[in-house]
Image: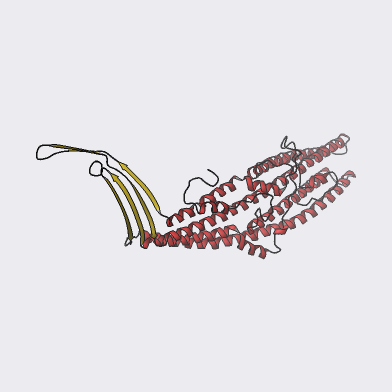
Amino acid sequence: MSRVRVSGRNAALAAVAFAFAASVAPGAVTRAAAETLESALSRAYIASPLINGERAGVRAADERVPQALSGYRPRISASADIGRSWSESENRFGNTVQSALTPRGIGLTINQTIYNGGRTAAGVRQAESQVFAARQNLEASVQDILFQAAQAYMNVLRDTAIINLQRNNLDVLAEQLRQTQDRFDVGEVTRTDVAQSEARVAAARSQVSLAEANLRSSIAVYRRIVGVDPRQLAPGNVPERLIPGTVDAAVSIALADNPNITAARHALDAAQATVRRVEGELLPTLGVQGSVSHRYDNSQSGDRATSASVVARLDVPLYQGGEVSSRVREAKEIAQQRRFEVEFVRDQVRASVIAAWGQFEASTAQIQAAQAQVSAAETALTGVREEARVGQRTTLDVLNAQQELLNARVNLITAQRDRVVAGYAVLQAMGRLTPVTLSLNTRIYDPSVHFEQVDGLWYGTQTPSGQ
């Protein structure tokens, strides 16, 4: 933000970069280095619970790929059993024969699918598309949090500037009330003039209280998003270098880079893979099963037996009651739904870019108008005060002029805040509000690292992070 053009004792109050007032947050003012907008965005990127939760969600989505790849691999199982049997019989000679056995054995079975109608390949494609969609959703969440952090940062600056203006206005009105009371005591003005000044002082106190409440609320939001309390915030600026010269160029960039569009496309790919996976259930399945077992005391005490077999099995589905066919039709309709969602998201992104661009241009014009308004209000206030000294203006005229100047300064500060926020909204709509494009001084999270760590794992329950 640029500085408000003011003069005299109010010049320092019109700047956007304000330290916190001790009366608003006692003990909050420190001599620590000023926080910048970029450092606040870096803090939010690292500490945001929402972003960290989304990262965990992406890591969970990564596991769907090795789950799908397991369809290419054998299934091996081992078994063991032990029991106790007892029998007694009598032969024709009247002799009693008793038998006590402990049948037991161990076995190993291996099942390997040779062909399953392409279901495994389709499942891998579906899982990979879901991973890519999860990454893009993470990117969209990151950009949303960074925008919220920029908005919270500028809200604190705005509310801090406004509270200083309101306090300064209260001081000016209190001094004017004292002067009006002195003039009333010597008979230069009436009781009405004093009452008007008292009313404005009371209203100013109310505005100070409201400004303090707004600032506390903005500080609370800042802490929720950034993770720390704000301390001596430096001025925030629009990253002009990242904003193209025309709205058409911004729309073109958004249609290519916005993560919401890319996520919708990957969701469509996953839905199409689901169709192929379900259709595979209508095709034959070919598999091989190998088994080996070793048994003891199976028929008489002390005997042993070893057996092994290899069996090829072909299953051809003929009729499943229409259940699989219905799921195929369902999957096709879902894929069609995802296709429409891609177009909807594209239109939504285009509208967001145009709206943010309009706000950005409008706020620029508002700053220029507000600067002219401040300059004119200052001139008018000076003139009204001089005319009031010679009796050509009333106390009410001076109070009105003072209020108009205050409103003009508040409007300028608000317009300056709005321009910065609108600039970041344009970047978010384009898909460029990322730590990389903003050149934030922070470690960038790479979701592909975890994916590569788990993609080829055949076994193990421990996560790469050690959990």
**Residue found 88% across the figure and 38% down from its top:** 188
Label total for image: 0
**Side of 377 relative to 426 (left or right):** right
Please indicate, yes or no, whether residue 199 appears anywhere in the rendered image: yes
**Residue found 54% across the figure and 59% down from its top:** 264
Q: Where's residue 92, x and y in %?
A: 9, 40
Please indicate, yes or no, whether residue 320 appears anywhere in the rendered image: no
Q: Name the outermost residue toward the right.
A: 390
Quarter of the figure with residue 242: bottom right
**Side of 424 relative to 456 (left or right):** right
Judging depth in this view, the residue of 258 and 121 nearest the camera is 121
Quarter of the figure with residue 23: top right
| Rendering colour mode | secondary structure
Judging depth in this view, the residue of 127 and 198 nearest the camera is 127
Q: Where's residue 53, x and y in %?
A: 56, 47
Q: Where's residue 69, x and y in %?
A: 46, 56
Q: Where's residue 429, x and y in %?
A: 63, 58
Judging depth in this view, the residue of 42 and 332 nearest the camera is 42
Quarter of the figure with residue 10: top right
**Residue found 47% across the figure and 49% down from its top:** 459
Q: Name the outermost residue toward the left.
A: 93
Q: Is residue 411 above or below residue 198?
A: below
